[in-house]
Image (spheres, grey):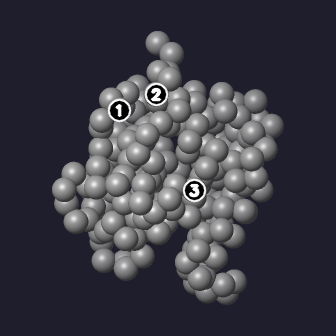
Amino acid sequence: MPISDFRKKKLLYVFNVFFDVNQSGEIDRKDFELAIEKICELRGWPVGNPRNTETHESMFKIWDGLRSKADKDNDGQVSVEEWCKMWDEYARDPDSVLDWQLRYMNFMFDLEDASNDGGIDAEEFSIVCSSYGPDKQECQQAFRKMAQGSDEVNREQFAELWREYFSTDDPTAPGNFIFGKTAF
């Protein structure tokens, strides 16, 4: 069964906004270099700062994992088709999460948990997500939908929401809002 239009829109949002940073139509190492630059600038982590170094290491491990899983034609790039196929395989068996996917999920959680207190609140969430396009109000609305009335989301909850984002076709599922968008 092919990917639903709804799920494809979600996958393309993440592809275009968080991964294909230079908007070339494919994901490659250069996109990761640009993403690292943006993340470190957002958080105020200059070169030489341990968090800057950690970000570089984590993101390049994510890239290596993504490329090894999704780059089926071994051209050093991940196309939209390869991206969607990989996530469709994940949706069929979300328990078979790959190391790079888990690393990326934890990276995003840690990025959003600016206070490093083990939970993401609406302010932390909206600062990070709005830096990628949606306005802060939409991000705060997305947080309310995602958190389902709670003041914060912990790592375990985030993991379940993450799984839901990449596997559900239900437009009302709370996981659909983990990237700050309220509609697809």
* Residue neighbourhood size for the residue with mark 1, other residues' Cα within 10 Å, grouped as few (<14), some (14–19), many (≥20): some
**What residue does disc 3 label?**
133
Label 2 crowding class (10 Å Cα cut-off): few <14, some 14-19, many 20+? some
Looking at the rendering, which quadrant does residue 52 occupy? bottom right
Q: Is residue 93 visible?
A: no
Q: Amino acid at mark 2?
A: Phe
Q: Amino acid at mark 1?
A: Pro
Residue in the picture at 60% in, 69% down: 39
> Which of disc 2 and disc 3 is earlier in sequence?
2
Q: Is 103 or 84 nearer to us in this picture? A: 84
* Disc 3 from disc 2: Cα separation: 20 Å
Q: What percent of the width, then of the height, locates residue 74?
A: 77, 35
Three-letter amino acid code at the position of disc 3: Gly
Horizontal and vertical percent position of residue 69: 61, 38
Q: Give the x, y percent position of residue 58.
A: 57, 64
Residue under circle 1? Answer: 171
User: What kind of element bears circle 3?
Assistant: loop
Q: Are marks 1 and 2 in contact (CB under 8 Å)?
A: yes
